[in-house]
Image (cartoon, rainbow, N blue to C red):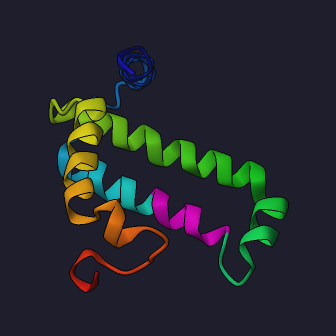
Amino acid sequence: MNELIQKVVKFRDLRNWKQYHNPKDLAISLSIEASELLENFQWKTSEESVSNNYARIQDELADVLIYALLLSNELKIDPQQAIIEKMKKNGEKYPVEKAYGSNKKYNEL
């Protein structure tokens, strides 16, 4: 993970873009890219979206991940550790015996 973050940071730094990459603007950019990802699914079934827009979905997902990694780097958040900690919290909110096969939110289980 750190190697990937360093590649993304190097790409950014070679272009002198760090000046634009404060936490607020990175979070905004992350949301914008997530919306661009969603556009690939609008008005289509999931299957149609994937089969017709796979390359665009891949590119937009990469943009989302890039901004997430840049934001984690800027805030000194270890993404791997953050995911592990969040999965633990989710495990407590969604115990298998209650959440298995259910799409209900934790407070509805």
Residue at the image position 67 percent from the left and 54 percent from the top? 57
Number of numbered discs on residues: 0
**Magenta region includes residue 1:** no
In the picture, measured across the screen, residue 91 lies left or right of residue 15, that is left
Q: Tell me: 20 left or right of 30.
A: left
Query: In the rendered image, which quarter is residue 31 located in?
Result: bottom left
99 with respect to 24 (left or right): right
Q: Choose top left, top right, bottom left or bottom right for residue 76.
A: top left
From what the image shows, is residue 32 above or below residue 39?
above
Residue 82 seen in the current view:
yes
Residue at the image point whose x is 45% and y is 42% from the top: 65
- Residue 35's x, y, as percent? 49, 67
**Most foreground residue, 91 or 31:** 91
- Quick one: 11 or 99, which is closer to the camera? 99
Please give the name of the residue rendered at 66% of the width and 47% of the height, measured from the top-left corner. 58
Q: Position of residue 83 (x, y in %)?
A: 29, 41
> Which residue occupies 51% across, 45% down?
63
> Looking at the rendering, in which quadrant would you find the C terminus?
bottom left
Which quarter shows the N terminus? top left
- For this orientation, the residue located farthest to the left is 75
Q: Inspect this view and state whether residue 20 appears.
A: no
Give the percent coordinates (x, y) of residue 71. 27, 40
Residue farthest along the front direction in this orientation: 97
Residue 95 placement (x, y as % from top left):
28, 62
For the stretch drawn in magenta, what is the main secondary structure? helix
Magenta segment = 33-40
Is 78 located above or below residue 47 in the figure? above
